[in-house]
Amino acid sequence: MVLPPQTSTPYLLTTLPAKAPLQDAMVGLKLNQLRTPALIIDRSRFAENCAKMHDKAKAFGSSFRAHVKSHKTMEGTRLQLVSSSGKSSTTIVSTMQELWQLLPLFEEGIATDVLYALPLPLTLLSDLSSFQDRITPFGGQLLIMIDHPDQVKGLEEFEKVAALDPSYESKFKCFVKVNQGGNRAGIIPSDEVLPALISTILASPVLKLFGFYCHAGNAYASTCCEDAHSYLETEVECADGAGRMATSLLAELSPSLQSKYKDTRWVLSVGSTPTAHSAGTEEDGKRAELSGDLELHAGNYPLLDLQQLSTGLATLPSVGCSVISTVISSYDLRSEKMCDAGCIAMSKDVGPEKGLGRVLNLDETTTGWRLGRVSQEHGLLVKNDKEGEAKALEIGQKIRIVPQHACITLAAYPFYYIVDSSEEDADTVVDVWVPWKGW
Ligand SMILES: Cc1ncc(COP(=O)(O)O)c(C=O)c1O
């Protein structure tokens, strides 16, 4: 195996807009005063959604691991980890930028463990290794995701020199990604690569098996709790099956390798926002003994969006983000209006609900319009199909658009305006969050 050259991007040097001058300029503004398009997060809804997820995990009888990629902010991560219902300290990232930005939370002891959730890119070994070294003094653990034997070979190659040192202890722990049917990533349970990979990991001096990870991205197709729960059960079944496989493979290995895993229980990590929302049913409480400890994970849940509303497991008053846009033109012959939110401001993601966004008034009442088509920097508003539902929209009017997929919509914005609907002045900016950009 020839290892690719290692990256050495100075992640912490990436320039982000400074928060303080933005706060000085923006806090106190009313929603209808904002330059549009503007991304709004409702802090109290975000916090409530985080508390509800901690409750879900408790009802599911599991720990909780929060993905930070949907908002990519320090403020949002803190709310995910410490809510009015509980605390968790385990996190997930999808970029190196997110990983490095979590460092202060390890220094503070708020985060104890983080999963870099892409299947291990061999270009990042040096960066991942330095991150582990930075969090070790605080008792922090970096987890990596493995779904191919070459990733283990690459890591062994990278750690070769280290492993010759008799005092060497493997610094990497890993989840094995199990494909539960969504075909996003991972190995399907019946693939003969799975037992071979588990055995390779168990025998490897540079890696320790931590558990099995399933992510039901396909559960976004759910239309009710029962649907989503059946995806969740498949996740549990697949992670548990792989855990059983690992336990029996371990029993065939040498006593010294077995001793490396003495007192270890696999972590069986399952979830996506729809399946996590469906967790905690009576059936969950009656589950037979599993091969490891359950962990629930999710990322989109503090924000929510039209895709989540379409699952029937979230309601409009709990959606924590929206885009404020301005009506800028009108085409009366074809009954369309133009607004200043195009595909950069909204994304081109679609969902079961028609259109690229649901158009509301600033006070969240319905307008009877949707975002029907988008160009780069402008969008066309079309009337909903229900006859007579559409209210008049005037040029210059500010509208609120609920995005189809919050995670992709947020990615376009250099900062988010924060409001708080639990406060009297729910349409006043109370803070500004600056997300981590780049990879
Ligand atoms: C590996 C992984 N884990 C967890 C999540 C979080 O899923 P969701 O945003 O549906 O909660 C994602 C989302 O894309 C993911 O890719």
Image (tube, grey):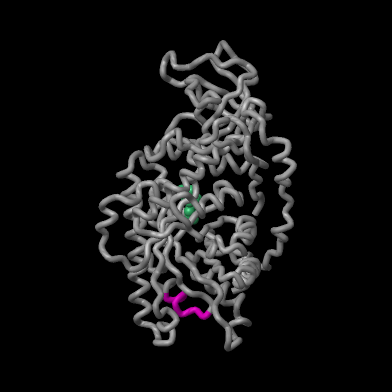
Viewer-proximal residue among 258 and 101: 101
Q: Which residues are magenta?
A: 199-205
Q: Is residue 201 magenta?
A: yes
Q: Residue furthest front?
A: 424
Residue 365, image x, y percentages? 48, 23
Residue 221, image x, y percentages? 39, 42
Which residue is drawn at the image coordinates 32% and 54% (left, top)?
233
Count every numbered label the image shows and give the total. 0
- Asked if residue 232 is positioned above or below residue 418 in the image, the reply reads below
- Secondary structure, magenta segment, majority class: helix
Work out which quarter of the rendered image holds the C terminus and state it. bottom right
Work out which quarter of the rendered image holds the N terminus and state it. bottom right
Q: Residue furthest top?
A: 333
Image quadrant assignment for residue 386: top left
Q: Is residue 328 magenta?
A: no
Which residue is drawn at the image coordinates 31% and 49% (left, top)?
230
Viewer-proximal residue among 355 and 134: 134
The reply to whether residue 217 is in sight is: no
Residue 353, image x, y percentages? 44, 32
Viewer-proximal residue among 190 and 40: 40
The reply to whether residue 401 is in sight is: yes
Residue 329, image x, y percentages? 64, 18
Which residue is drawn at the image coordinates 28% and 66% (left, top)?
289
Which residue is drawn at the image coordinates 33% and 51% (left, top)?
280
Q: Is residue 439 left or right of residue 223?
A: right
Viewer-proximal residue among 344 and 25: 25
- Asked if residue 323 is positioned above or below residue 191 in the image, the reply reads above
